Amino acid sequence: MDWWSKFYASTGEKNKYGTYLERGLDTLTVYDRELEKVEGFQGLSDFCRTFKLQRGKTREDGEDPSVVGEFKGMFKIYTLPDDPSDPAPPRQFRKLPPNGVEECLVRVYVIQAQGLQPKDANGKCDPYVKITLGKQTISDHENYIPSTLEPVFGKYVTPLVV
């Protein structure tokens, strides 16, 4: 039994989860909308903010039709004072990372997409996973999912080092 069996058992897709439920294993609660809109979560008013993802550059300050998605998370960047006796900026971590370039390992899990824009004449699209981080690009174009606006990818992208 794997994570996908648990996911499909939770969404009721019996032909995809086999004997998962008969084994007495746990399921997930899968919501049909963003967690911010689920009444019990009070709008997820935690540390995260929502950043609009845009295709290309914006042209004006108003609502731009090039918005293609959202990233929910938080970025905090602080400059350290020149004088070591000045108070340090507020910290999210016990130790601030060193100044300069820092190598990071980035893992990307792409589960599914919802409400994609149609690109084909049939009102659907042929989505695939493409991730660009810095100068690295990973494209899984050869494994596109034909004719859908609600693809389930279930992919773990090989770790990227930036």
Image (spheres, rainbow, N blue to C red):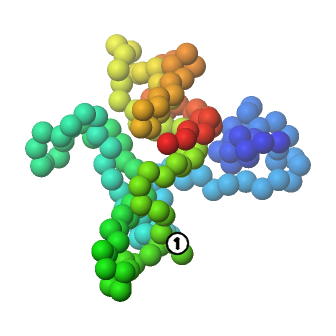
Q: Percent x, y for residue 64?
A: 18, 41
Quarter of the picture containing the N terminus is top right
Q: Is residue 99 above or below residue 110?
A: below
Q: Is residue 145 above or below residue 133?
A: above
In this rendering, does residue 111 appear at all?
no
Q: Is residue 42 above or below residue 4?
A: below
Q: Which residue is mark 1?
A: 95
Q: For the residue labelled by badge 1, is the local secondary structure a helix, a strand or a loop?
A: loop
Q: Is residue 104 left or right of residue 26?
A: left
Q: Residue furthest right?
A: 23
Q: Tag count in the figure?
A: 1
Q: Percent x, y for residue 145?
A: 54, 21
Judge by depth and name the residue closer to the eye, 17 or 153.
Answer: 153
Residue beneath the point at 48% across and 52% down = 102
Residue beneath the point at 78% across and 56% down = 26
Residue beneath the point at 47% across and 73% down = 92
Q: Is residue 57 left or right of residue 26?
A: left
Judge by depth and name the residue closer to the eye, 104 or 25.
Answer: 104
Q: Is residue 79 left or right of residue 18?
A: left
Quarter of the view holding residue 43: bottom left
In this rendering, does residue 160 appear at all?
yes
Q: Percent x, y for residue 53?
A: 32, 44
Dot 1 surroundings within 10 Å: few (below 14), some, or many (20 or more)? few
Judge by depth and name the residue closer to the eye, 95 or 81.
Answer: 81
Q: Percent x, y for residue 74?
A: 41, 61
Residue beneath the point at 31% across and 48% down = 52
Identify the amino acid type marked 1.
Answer: Lys
